[in-house]
Structure formats: structure tokens, C-alpha cells
Amino acid sequence: MKKESLASDVHKSSIVVNVFLNLIFVVFCIVCIYPMLLIIGTSFASEESLLQYGYRVFPKEFSSYAYTYILSNTSTILRAYWVTILSTLVGTAMSVLVNALYAYAVSRQEFKYRNFFTFYMFFTMLFGGGMVPWYLVCTRLLHLTDTFWALVLPSVCSAWNMIILRTFFASTVPNAVVESARIDGASEMRTLFSIVFPISLPGLATIGLFAMLGYWNNYYNALMLTNDVKWQNLQLYLYNILTNISMLQGSNSAVGNSDVLLKTMPKEAARMAMCVVTVGPIIFAYPFFQKYFVQGLTIGAVKG
Amino acid sequence: MMSKKRITNKIAKNRITFEYLLMVLPGFLLTLIFAYIPMVGILVAFKNIDYSKGILFSPWCGMANFKLLFASPDLKIILRNTIGYNLSFVVLNAVIPLTLSIALSQLRNKRTSKVYQTIIMLPHFISYIIVTYIVYAFLSYKLGTVNNLLQRFGVEPTDWYSNVKVWPYIILFLGVWKVTGYNSVVYLAAITGIDDTLYEAAAIDGAKKYQQIWYVTLPQLANVVIIMVILNLGAILNSDIGLFLNVPMEKGQLFPVTNVISTYTYRALRINGDVGMSSAAGFFQSVVGFIIVLITNSCVKKIDSEKALF
């Protein structure tokens, strides 16, 4: 009896401390969530009330004009959306496949060169060539500029995800299963696809979510490797609109037609609506994949 | 009979090895192209790149690019900014999440703790482009929430995007805001993994709560924290382009406090097309970062070899 109370005591604070801690977390939660609400609120405000009262969480005048605007303006916004969706789907599929194949091989004791290949990946976490040689490889060697693959290929391999998966395979796939498949005459590849992958779905899902989030939020590749609007994803497109507008506003007198140009740009509420549409899928999916994220953190007890 | 069996065994083993090699091949090639070739590629810093001759055949130019870089008046500022911000981040992003994760583990109601975890992880899932919009919503001159609030109290609105004084705080705040929740949950996962008997033993020995945290929780977390700190120190010359380039919206007035090596390299490369200077800066970044990783790791190894990264 005594022992039990001791153990549960360990993880509980006194009431006063508890209230204090809760207070801290409530404040912190507001700091995390208020900005989102501000963006959502603004996106539902009518343009006039926005110009009069500024950005607000609860708009003075409700309007869904911003959303009809983005849906009607088919050419650029939907194109950017499509680029983001496509690169996320293709990238995630490739990333999971490539990393899982690699991770499985290096997780097997009987693979002679496993140490070499593990180190090969691990080393990229410690040392990297940096932006310039990477840029030269992408543009001069592979000619990725303004192609779809510029958004996908450079981020397929991730040492971090690979190591998490390796740990996962090593700790969850029973050796006996692989060996009995081998005795039954299955090739290693076949074992991997029809036995190991199906029992490793939680691990693969975790890595898939990491990859998906990475691709959805990726603007670095687009920033570096696209000049043409055609291959700009949602993130870069959003950013370009914002900087263009602030540039035009800044140069009102210098450029005669900046007012005309400004008028063709998406308005305040429309831009915020685009933000909402960009983070929307993440926020909606978030409660579902949060579990996997935490799981991914715990299975990935990384050590080289 | 024996030898025949051995031969088939050997063939089977070779087949297995071959199949495993096939499995690592795609990852091997992609990593070769996007990580290893660029590693060798840092040598372009010693070249005078001439695209008409190709990168391989461009003439070597010794230290010329570095001389240009070190002569640049910007260098002092970008070095100060890079190291200043990153050192602050190494400390803040270890101490704050650690504190919060311990606090999370001490909450009496586990369900509210779950709710907090869900909410504080949110910033981690949002790109810096969206953060740029958020910051703009707060700081925009005409419509921003901050200026609105100031006006209500009769204070003149300010153009925050040219105010050099506040930006260091904005950047520090955002850099912390973005990762704190996530890191706290990582550390919390490690805390939940600590064996309860350690706490019981400490309690029986008369350790008070803060002593249990100090003598049990923190040492148990040391492994995770040290690995994070080593990796962060190795990246001490790298900065997130999103935070330093996009969030301040590339405003020239803010360069004195937002220009870091990464943004400097980016601008030299993408805007001015100056490969020489940017590659010199990049070389510096990569090599110094690697040396720092090696040094910190060997220091950690000397103190406690179990806790080193490699």
C-alpha cells in the first residue's frame, strides 16, 4: 500500500504548484493558438471592415467572399495547390519506399555491409556541403530548375527517418519470421514486401507522416530551384504574393502603375484565406497523426 | 556431401547479400547525389567558376574567394548574428523545453496534460511562410494588431519592419515558439520512460520533489539532451532561411540584425549570382560546423563515453 502511494506521488505535484503549472500552460497554449485564430478570423472578414478595424480574431462583418475569390481565381492558386498536392503524394511515396528499403537492409544482422551503410547515412547528419554545391548539383548536374522533380527528389532520402525506421525494424520484426520465410524459399525482397511491411505499418505510417508534412511545408526547394510560376508550390506562391504587395506598397511613387498592379493582387482577406487553406489540411489531420508523431519520437531512440 | 552443402550455403549467402545491396541502392544513389557530391563540391570555394568551361574545368584560384569574403564589411555582422542567435537558441531550446517537460510530467490531471501537449506542438507543424503571414498580421503598419492596439491607447503606430531594435527579440521569440512544444513532448516521452523504482528509492532516502528532479530526472534525460545539443552546436553556423529571410520579408533595413551566413549565401547565390563568395561562406560554414561536432563529441566522450553521439 505504502509503495503504491509513493510511486503515484512521484508524478504529482502539490495543489498550489499544480495550479501554477496549469496557469503557465494555459498562457503558453494561448500563445500557440491565438495566431491561428487571428488568421482564420481575418479570412472571414469583409474587406471594408478589415480596412477599418484591422486584423481581428472576431471579424466585425462576416463574409465568405475571400473563399469564393480563391475558388474562382482558378489559374494560379489552384495550380499552386495542385503542385503542392502532387509533390507531396509522389514525394511521400518515394520517401517511404526508399527509406524503408534502406532501413530494413541495414537492420538485418546477416547483411555483411550493414555497418558501412549505416555510417554512410549517419555521416550526412554530421557533415554537409551546404547550399552552394547542393545548388550546383541540382541546377548544373541534374538540371532540375523549373521541373516537378526539383520539388521531390532532393528531399527523398532522410538520414533521420532512415535511422528511426532501422531502430523500428530491428526492435519489432521477429528474426524467426524472416528466417522461416527464407526457409520456405521466399526471396528477401518478397519477405520484405509481403511479411515485414504489413507487420510494420505503424512505423511506416509514422515515417510517412513525417515525410508528408515535410513535403507539404517545403518551400526551400521551390525557393532555390524554381523561377517559373508554373512550378511554384503553395508555400512559395503565398510568400511571393506577400513580398510583392509590400514591395508595391513601399514604392507607390516610384512605380506609376503600382496601384493598378496592387488592385490585381489578392486582397487582405483572400490572402489570409489562402493561408487557412494551406494549413487547413494539417490542422484537420493533426489530431489523427499526433499519436503517430509521439510514437515516432519514442521509437526513434537514435544512436549511431 | 559436406562441401556441396557449404557451396549452396555460400551461394545462398551471396544471394542474400546481393538482395540487401539492391535494397540500399536507391537510397545510396540519392544520398550520393544530394549529400556526398556536394560534400566534395565544397571545393568550388577554391575555384573561379566559369560556367562556359564547366565546373570541373574551371580554373583554381586559391584563396581569392576567401580574401573577398574576409574583406567584406558584412562579415563581422553576419558572424555576430549567426553565432549570437544560434548560441541563444542552443541554450533556450534546451532549457525551456526541459523545464516544460518536467512541468508536464508533474501535472495532476493527465487528460489536461494531453490537451496541452496537442496544442503546444502546433507551431512545429506550420511552415515559416505561414509564420511570416502571422507576424505580418501582428506587425503590418496599417492593419496590424499591434499598431491597432497602440492606437487605442493613443500611441503613434510604428513601422515595425524597419525597427532594428525589436527584431532580435522577435526572431528569438519565434525560434523558441516554433520548437518549444515539440521538444517538450520529446523530453516528456523520455521522462515517462524513466523507471519508477528510481524515484521510489530516492523518496525512501528522503529526497524532496526538487531533489528527485535534480538527481533522478535530469541525469536520466542527459542522453537525449546531449545528443540534441551536439547536433545543434554542429549547426551553429547554419540558420533557418525561413526565420531569417522570409519572416522579416527580406527588408533591407533589417539586415543589420537579420543577416546571417545562410541568408548571405542565399542572396549572393540567388540574387547576385556570385558563386565565388557564397561558396567561400558555405565552405566556412560546413567545415567549422563539422569541427565543432567533433570537438564537442570528444569532450562528451572524455567525461562520459556512454553519452557521446558516436
Image: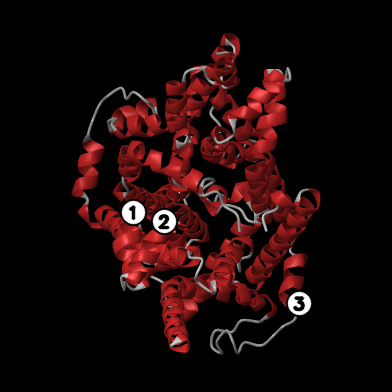
Q: Position of residue B263 (x, y in %)?
A: 59, 57
Q: Nearer the viewer, residue A107 or A267?
A: A107
Q: Is residue B253 above or below residue B154?
A: below
Q: Is residue B308 above or below residue A135?
A: above
Q: Secondary structure at mark 2?
A: loop
Pointer 1: residues within 10 angstroms few (<14), some, or many (20+)? Answer: some
Cα separation between marks 2 and 3: 53 Å
Which quadrant holds the C terminus of chain A? Answer: bottom right
Residues marked 1 and 2 touching at CB (< 8 Å): yes
Mark 1 or mark 2: name the one nearer the start of the chain: 2
Q: Which chain's residue wears label 3?
A: B
The image quarter containing residue B72 is bottom right
Residue that carries the numbered disc 1 in the rendered image = A199
Pointer 3: residues within 10 angstroms few (<14), some, or many (20+)? Answer: few
Tell me the amino acid under the disc marked 1.
Ile
Q: Residue at x 30, y 58 (%)?
A: A89
Tell me the amino acid under the disc marked 3.
Met
Residue that carries the numbered disc 3 in the rendered image = B63
Q: Is residue A73 above or below residue B70?
A: above
Residue that carries the numbered disc 2 in the rendered image = A173
Which quadrant holds the N terminus of chain A? Answer: top right
Query: Total marks drawn?
Result: 3
